[in-house]
Amino acid sequence: MGYVDSPAVFSVAVQRTLAKMTDLPSTVCVLQYADDLIISSETCEDCEKASIIVCNVLAQAGFKASKEKLQWVQPKVTYLGHIIMPGLRAISTDRVQMIRKMKSPQTVQQLQSFLGLVNYCRSWIPDCAIHDKYLRSLIDRKAPPKTLLNWTDEAEMHFAALKKAITTAPSLGLPSFQKEFHLHVRETEGVAMGVLLQQHGSTYRPVAYLSKKLDNVAAGMPACLRAVSAAAIVVQMAEKIVLSHPMIVYTSHQVWLYVSPYAQVHRMTTAVPKSAALSHKKLPRPLATESQ
C-alpha cells in the first residue's frame, strides 16, 4: 500500500527542480510528463549541453535516472509510447506488438483495456470513433468487470479493423506552425470525422486523424445540422494541435450554407475556439480521397 497521490507529488517535485535550471541554450525545449523527460534542440551540441545541465540539476536535488531507459542525444527516440523523429511521429513498436497479439476480448474488463490502448493511438486511426462507438455499445456500465460479452461477428469486424489500423498505421507529420493547416471534416453514422493536413513537398501529409461520437441531441438532428455540428466538433479538436494558427476548413456544401451567414473573412464567430485565422472552403470530393 502506498500514498495514492505519490505520482502527482513526485511530478510536482521534478517540475519545481527543473524550474531552477539556468543557462539552457535558446534552441532547447525541455518537456516533462510525470517522471518522463524529453529534451529537444536544433543541434546535437545544444541538446547534449542541455542534457548535462538537466542531469546535474536533478542529481543535485537527489533524483536518480535509469541508465537502461536513457536515450542520449538521438535523432530518433521513444517517448510515452510514441516514436519521435525529425518531422514525424509514429506508434512505438512495443505498443504495436502488444495490440497485434491481443485476442478477441471475452469480458467487459478485457474490452475496456483494449479500447484504452486504442484510444491512446486514435490520432493514427481515421475512423476510430465509429469502431469505438459500436464496441462500447456492448458494455453494460453497471456490469461487473468479469461479465461475459455478447461477442458477435460484427463486433469481431470492428475489433479487427482497429487492430489493423494500428498495426499498419503510417507515421504522422509533426505540426509546423510556419505552414497553414488544412482540415477536412465530415459526418457519418453519427460520428464527427476529420483529418488535419499540412503541405509536404507536392502533396499533403496527415498530422492527425480526428473523430468523436456526436451527443444524443446532435445525433438526432437532420443530416444537414449533423454536418454542421460535426464541423464545429472537429474544429475544436484540431485547435489543440493548431493552437490558433492559420487553418483552412474544408466542408460539404450544406455546412457552408449554414455557416456562411455567420462567418467573417478569416474568422468564424460561431461555436469555434479562438482561431486567429480560420478560412473555409467547400469540400470538392469525398474526404477519403483528400488524405494521402
Image (cartoon, rainbow, N blue to C red):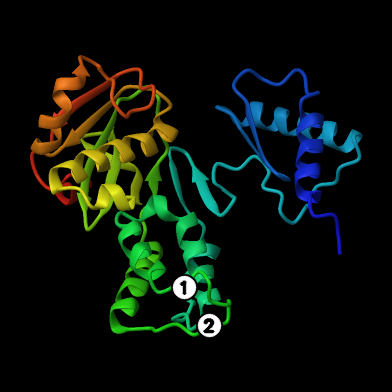
Mark 2 sits on what residue? 147
Residue type, mark 2 in image: Thr
Q: Please name whichever residue, 204 or 122, is drawn nearer the observer in this view of the structure.
A: 122
Left or right: residue 89 compared with residue 246: right
Q: Quadrant of the N terminus?
A: bottom right
Q: Quadrant of residue 252?
A: top left
Residue type, mark 1 in image: Asp
What residue do we see at 21% from left, 45% from top? 226
- Residue 154 is situated, as x and y percent measured from the top left of the image, at 28, 78
Helix, strand or loop at label 2? It is loop
- Residue 151 is situated, as x and y percent measured from the top left of the image, at 38, 83
Left or right: residue 47 compared with residue 16: left
Residue 202 higher or lower than 288, as above or below: above
What residue do we see at 35% from left, 74% from top? 160
Mark 1 sits on what residue? 140
Badge 2 or badge 1: first in the primary sequence: 1
CB of mark 2 within 8 Å of CB of mark 1? yes
Residue 245 higher or lower than 141, as above or below: above
Q: Please name whichever residue, 83 or 194, is drawn nearer the observer in this view of the structure.
A: 194
- Residue 224 is situated, as x and y percent measured from the top left of the image, at 13, 43
- Residue 4 is situated, as x and y percent measured from the top left of the image, at 79, 55
